[in-house]
Image: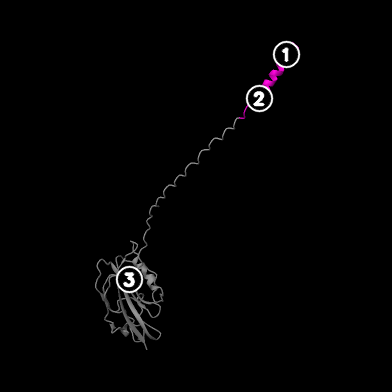
Amino acid sequence: MKHLNRLFAAAAALMILTGCGSQTAQPSPEPAETAAPAAETEAPAETEAPEVSVAEEPAEFDPASLPVIALSSENLHDGVWDDAVSNTDKGTNSSPQLSWEPVGDAACYAVYMVDTTATFWLHWKSLGVTETELPAGWASADEYVGPYPPSGTHEYEIRVFALKEQITEEKSVFDRSNYNFDDLVKALDEGSGGSGNVLAYGTLKGTFTRS
């Protein structure tokens, strides 16, 4: 009996060993497919930046672009100023007679005389003038000093500006050199409205010679 038991045990062990050896190796599962990378999305279309309006700078003040005032003087002959308007031993230091046609909408005028030969030496400066017929000697002594060149011939130019509204101050200096005169009189154009105060402009040129 013991012999049979041993036999059965050996047979069972053999069967177990045979079964284990006959098992085929299972293939290892393939790795799961990785998801394809997401398609690249298109960048959003660029939108144009909104236009930004830029305030225009005011136009440069240019008297030459203004309507012309025709000036005349009884003290100017053949382009030469009379001795009477000079501040010399031959003159009376009297402002020249001066006239022009009134300018529409002008409230007043600014009158200057400058020696353009001597860096715009200012001989006449009258602001707030409301007349258009100025007799000889009209300007006061604190507004007019006649030509008195040291020697030789100098050119003296009268300039008249028609103004929409009165201006009582600008930085040109009477009886002194004003080398930047054109810049200084820009103040005439800057009335309460900001610009456009000068409506018209006139010039009258003549020479004076000190012998």
- Foreground residue among 34 and 172: 34
The quarter of the picture where residue 11 lies is: top right
Q: Give the Cα separation between the discs numbered 1 and 3.
A: 138 Å
The residue labelled by disc 3 is 63
**Alpha-carbon neighbours of circle 1 within 10 Å: few (<14), some, or many (≥20)?**
few
**Is residue 134 at all visible to an observer of this figure?**
no
Q: Is residue 15 above or below residue 151?
A: above
Q: Is residue 200 above or below residue 7?
A: below
The quarter of the picture where residue 145 lies is: bottom left
**Is residue 62 at all visible to an observer of this figure?**
yes
SS under mark 3: helix
Q: Is residue 101 above or below residue 19?
A: below
| Camera-side mark, 3 or 2 | 2
The residue labelled by disc 2 is 20
Q: Is residue 2 magenta?
A: yes
Q: Give the Cα separation between the discs numbered 2 and 1.
A: 23 Å
| Camera-side mark, 1 or 3 | 1
Q: Give the Cα separation between the discs numbered 3 and 2.
A: 117 Å
Placement of the N terminus among the 4 image quadrants: top right
The residue labelled by disc 1 is 5
- Foreground residue among 172 and 38: 38
Q: Position of residue 164 (x, y in %)?
A: 29, 65
- In the image, the segment drawn in magenta is 1-25
